[in-house]
Image: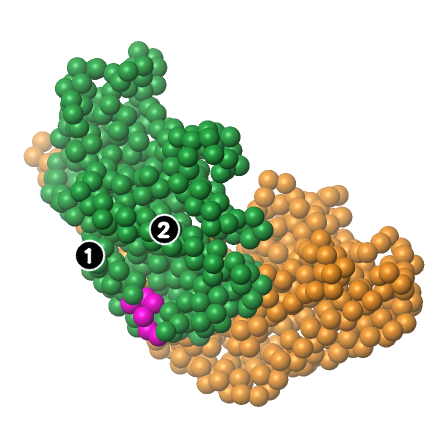
Amino acid sequence: MKKLFLLPLCATMLFVSCNNDDDNDSVDNGADITNPTLYTFERDGVSTVSFDGQTTRILMAGETTDAFKAFETATEASIKAMFAHVEGAVDFSEDDLNSSDKSIESKVAASSDFFAANTTEAAIIKGEFAGYIEGQINEVFPNENVLAAAGVAGQIADGTSTRYVNAQGLEYNQMFAKSLLGALMVDQILNNYLSTSVLDAESNRANNDNDVLEEGKTYTSMEHKWDEAYGYIYGTSENTENPNLTIGEDDKFLNEYTGRVNDDTDFSTIAADIFEAFKLGRAAIVAKDYDVRDEQAEIIRENISKVIAVRGIYYLQQAKTKIENEEVTGSFHALSEAYGFIYSLRFTRKPGTNDAYFIKTEVDGLLSQLTGDGENGLWDLEADTIENISEAIAAEFDFTVAQAASIE
Amino acid sequence: MKRTKVWGFIILLSLIVFACSTSDNGGGTSEESDDNFNRSAMLINWADNIIIPAYTAFNTDVSVMVQASSVFTETPSEENLENLRSAWKDAYVSFQSVSMFEIGKAEELNFRNRLNVYPTDVTSIEENISNNTYNFSLPSNIAIQGFPAIDYLINGLAATDAEIVAFYNSESTATGYNGYLNELTNTVLELSTTVLNDWQGSYRATFVAGTSSSATGSVDKLVNDFLFYYEKSLRAGKIGIPAGVFSVDPLPEKVEALYSKEIGKELLLAAITASQDFFNGKSFTTASEGESLKAYLDFLNTIKNGDDLSTLINNQFEISKTKAEELGNDLALQVTTDNSKMTETYDELQRNVILLKVDMLQALSINVDFIDADGD
């Protein structure tokens, strides 16, 4: 009997000992924290969970990305209007989105920790997103029916798909979507809503301690901030209480790529680790245990940062294989995705610090390597350069290039 | 009590070792596998006895189709239409023997997609015919050309042959339809000639010299191309997608040779046979077998569950053909009348994916170089 009892005990200890970096040896799962099975939190029988604004922004981001391919209808003004939506403007296909006062652009590079006092860089980043839109409309659209070549924008074949690239071989729509994944979703989660500067802002702690709810709402401000972080990854999940049932299938942004990285056996617990940390952290807020809350935030920071890095390297390595096989144009799609994931590294967060894994100048350096082997960008890119970039990224994390590159 | 603790500790320790031991053998190793199999002889057999003869035969059949198309467009008649259909069918069947070899010039040209993307885009074809503007070399135009587009033009324009012929005779439509049809058949010939010339020119030497067992060696590349073809084009394209394996409902409109209604099964069987012949290294023109994937597996004495893997693979090809034989000629009709025959065929084809892609690749130390795209 006793022996049997030891097994689960061992398993628990294992969990701890295998936990990546052990600056939090013992997860104090405080006896007074009620950790539910699903992301279900109620007060007097009424749900306290809410993240509509995040769901809205994910949907807006999806439609805006799609507009990059709307050759017949999109204009620079129309895509920019989607990006910086104003309440009531008919920018989207859904009335709910049009009537919303939310916009994507207002939350790009807008986290409390990274950009509150860094508006200069935030402006540069927003400008880069505008640049993707301008490039698509002014460089790619006119060449919709031109075969791309080195120095010439247009079409390339990618299996049965057609890709539309700029003169450097880059797809603006991929750069936009994958950069947004970092500048919006990752930045808002890791550096804003999970941050003590937001969770504990004003009298949030005292209010949470005393169950003081927001005006006309069912939740405390702190509970809501945490949920807003949750919404940036699970906001469009089929089952938002149990989002890992369909992880990877519910958007084209952070949810999708968390699922994709989780498909790699080298990272097969990452989706569960992220979800469990979200859940326990929220339960800790209910139990007013802020140490456990902050420990979970660090776990989420580490793992979501890893999703970005793994996927970036994965695409780089996919492209490297193509280039080695002399399928140059066949590498462009993966490289365009990689470009966005590398861009997104600037919004990652080293656990236990106030720093990204890569600052903007480092990211810019990696990107200029990617496009710097010759005057025509990806057309001139060499396999060795890809390897160097991959290694430079992996060096900051606890996994290898080979692990990120593998598909099983 | 004490003993329990000690036991617990040992269990714990072994569990930790087990769980924390680096289980990361993932990732592409580009190690040379040092077996002594004569890869060079296999590449030569593939090039000289299979690939080049198959392209040669295909090119001849395409030339006949171009000729028939030219005769038909000069003198549109039901008889000439029948002749064109017959030539189109022969070329289409012939294509099943080269479709898997998407390497070198074929890969560069996106050969398979330019010749055989279906369902064909009827709306765009009709628009292009009426505007008389189209550029077949644009990647976005793969669905308006090749065998499926010809299928539509010779089988799908109307219900009766007389009505189809009328499109090529009537003053208002003749120029557009005749021109488009000839452009279609000529483009197939142009692409096929380009690939054949490259094999007969410098590419053969490049291909057979690539004996390294790395990801960039010819064996790894062609085996990956073969598997990609088998999985996506044959298993999924010909059977899985129309049978609804990847969707909520079956999609009968997505069968190969949709408008002909007569040759879907024949194309499928030709493809399975060609795949099996490639595996066995069977000469394209005679019954003799040379160095091959089968020989390679036997050389390495590859066993699965007590049986030779090569035997299991060949058995599975045979079972697949037997299942496919039960299908009707019109695969779309098969989907709507008794789709279980389609899904059963799919299941047999899928069983060989496991044997080929998992077991064979493991034995040969070849890494898969393709994956499902994200779909974006």
Closer to the camera in the image, A258 or B139: B139
What residue occupies the far front of the structure in this picture?
A77
Residue occupying image coordinates x 51% and y 87%? B205
Which of the image's four quarters has the N terminus of chain B?
Answer: top left
Q: Quadrant of residue B173?
A: bottom right
Q: In the image, which residues are magenta?
A: A369-374
Closer to the camera in the image, A195 or B229: A195
Residue occupying image coordinates x 59% and y 40%? B248
Name the front one of labels 2 and 1. Answer: 2
Chain in orange in the render: B
Q: Quadrant of residue B314?
A: bottom right
As for residue A372 lying within the magenta part, the answer is yes
Please say if A183 is above or below B107: above
For label 1, the residue is: A396
For label 2, the residue is: A129
Horizontally, is B51 left or right of B261 in the view? left
Q: Colour of chain A?
A: green
Callout 1, which amino acid? Glu
Give the percent coordinates (x, y) of residue B278. 58, 72
What residue occupies the far left of the structure in this picture?
B2
Closer to the camera in the image, B153 or A81: A81
Give the percent coordinates (x, y) of residue B129. 75, 61
Label 2: chain? A
